[in-house]
Image (cartoon, rainbow, N blue to C red):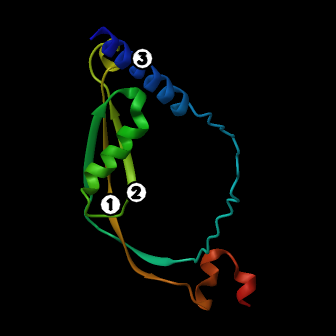
Amino acid sequence: MSKLLNAIGGFTLLATMCFVFVGCTSAARTNTLSALEFAPSAHTTATLADLVVSDRKVVGQASGLPSLRRALEQEAIANALQGNADALVGANFFYETKGTRAERNQNMTIVVIGYPAVFKNFRTPKSEDIWLFGKQEAAR
């Protein structure tokens, strides 16, 4: 029985060593960097549109940290337009801070008032529209 166990143990050792040596293959890695040429091509075309401005003023407001003033202005404009217009024409901003100096550094309210406007009638320019692009001499 012990001879059988020795034979099995020897076979197991031999099989393990074979797997280890056969399983260990050398892998060569190379680091090659290839660059693709990045030359985007774009064709731009001038586009004209009419801006239809409402005669009704809208109001929007936003509050937050004074350090985020520009973002608060944009949020106030978005709140004034409420997704119903493309731009706010004649915008007037009003800034309000309340409380002690420490409280004023923590909160600012921005109110914007203006006229909502919508772009309509998108078109490519014609020869009579060249003056809009500052090329009056080219039109003559």
Residue in front for this viewpoint, 41 or 139: 41
Are the residues flagged by discs 3 and 2 in contact, CB closer than 8 Å?
no
Residue matched to label 1: 115
Helix or strand or loop: what does disc 2 sit on? strand
First-in-chain label (2 vs 1): 2
Callout 3: SS: helix
Q: In this view, does 26 lie to the left or right of 108?
A: right
Q: As shown in the figure, which amino acid type bears the numbered disc 1?
A: Tyr
| Label 2 with label 1: CB-CB less than 8 Å | yes
Labels 1, 3: front one: 3
Q: Residues within 10 Å of mark 2 (few under 14, many from 20)?
A: few
Left or right of residue 24, residue 131 in this image: right
From the viewer's side, name the closer residue of 108 and 11: 11
Q: Where is residue 42 in the image (x, y as percent from the top left)?
A: 62, 71
The answer to whether residue 10 is above or below residue 118 is above
Q: How far apart are marks 1 and 3 (CA)?
A: 92 Å
The image shows residue 103 at horizontal and vertical percentages of: 29, 16
Residue at 62% across, 90% down: 127
Residue 76 sits in which quadrant? top left
